[in-house]
Image (cartoon, rainbow, N blue to C red):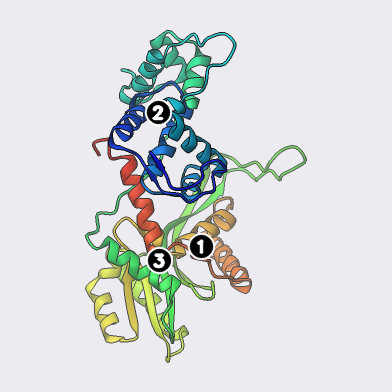
Amino acid sequence: MQNGGAYGDGTAESGVVVETGAAGATRKHGQFAFSSGRLVTRVRIVLLSASGKTNQQVARQLGLANATVGKWRRRFLERDVTGLHDELRPGRPRPISDERVAQLVRQTLDTKPKDGTHWSIRRMARQTRLSKSTVHCIWQAFGLQPHRQRHFKFSTDPFFVEKVRDIVGLYLNPPENAVVLCVEEKSQIQALERTQPMLPMGLGYGEGVTHDYRRHGTTTLFAALDTAKGTVMTQCRRRHRHQEYLDFLREIEKNVPPELDVHVIVDNYATHKHPRVKRWVAAHSRFHVHFTPTYASWLNQVEIWFNRITQRAIRRGTFRSVKELVAKIEQFVHADNAAARPFAWTATADSIFTKVQRLCERISGTAH
């Protein structure tokens, strides 16, 4: 390993070159040495440094201090792979061998209980004949959380890159003499009435509601968010078809000054691609439609606004009729538009692709 600058303070932006043998040994430790979660982090520091990253870049990626990165780069320089291990300390030796720790980690990652979907601390303790506290400590050291599950969905759109760049470009560099509208429908909003009156919040206890409710029908909320102003144009309709969507587009046309072009961002719902809708858009040359990639409606800013109205006005409400629900929605929209502020979109297309790449790298060994 060669050093192009100082390592001690962890701030030097020096190049690091790891020779083939050392790099191979380091990667081997990163894959198979389970003696400590800290050791894995140190190996990652060395490998990232060997790829040409600076101390600051490595620290930012791993969530460490610059001084910590500099310390372990210097230790590796001075002592090679052995420098990444903790020095011997006084006290009682650890009763569990590295092999048993490695076996527990592999069993957690590669197996499942016969009568369940994931391991619990007690089940794993019975299986490995270790104490519950030992299993907990090892899982915590390696960041293993079998009880947790994260949701994801990869876009299968062949034009994912082009569509992301197109829509993000509208957010970060909107065209002149034009308005950018994020359009979407929130369908099947239920008018739910709790079976008993709600209990108000008091000192020491929260608001109380019954778990069951009466249904009084549904409504569909059409919304168009102006990305430059943060205001929202809405319509509540009984049904959700291309006819209602066309009516909403006509309402947009009436409310947007005629000298402005209209860039509409929508998802791939069949209503948006109906032949009658396509003919209408073709007949109105100032309308430009931009479709989000498949399974990527999160690119549409109006989804953020839908979450806000759901949390603040709908989810915890109780409504005796659809008319009462619609009135509550209109009341929220009026108040929200009066104090509207645009969402600050900061993600670039490249930063989105980087996140997708990181996810792909994390699951590359899962045979997905």
Picture residue at 38% right of the left edge, 49% below the top: 52
Closest to the camera, between mark 3 and mark 2, is 2
**Marks 3 and 2: CB-CB under 8 Å?**
no
Sequence-earlier tag: 2 or 1: 2
Q: Residues within 10 Å of mark 2 (few under 14, many from 20)?
A: some
Residue 43 visible in the picture: yes
What mark, if any, has residue 184 been given in the picture?
Answer: 3
Q: Secondary structure at mark 1?
A: helix
Amino acid, disc 1: Trp
Side (left or right) of 362 relative to 178: left
Can see residue 142? no
37 and 52: which is toward the camera: 52
Residue 148 x %, y %? 44, 33
Disc marking residue 81: 2
Q: The residue tagged with tag 2: helix, strand or loop?
A: helix
C-beta proximity under 8 Å, tags 1 and 3: no
The CA distance from mark 1 to mark 3 is: 10 Å
Instruction: Give the residue at mark 1.
Output: 305
- Do the residues bearing badges 2 and 1 touch, measured as CB atoms within 8 Å? no
**Spatial CA span between label 2 and label 1:** 51 Å
> Residue 304: where, in percent of width, then height?
49, 60
Mark 1 vs 3, N-terminal side: 3
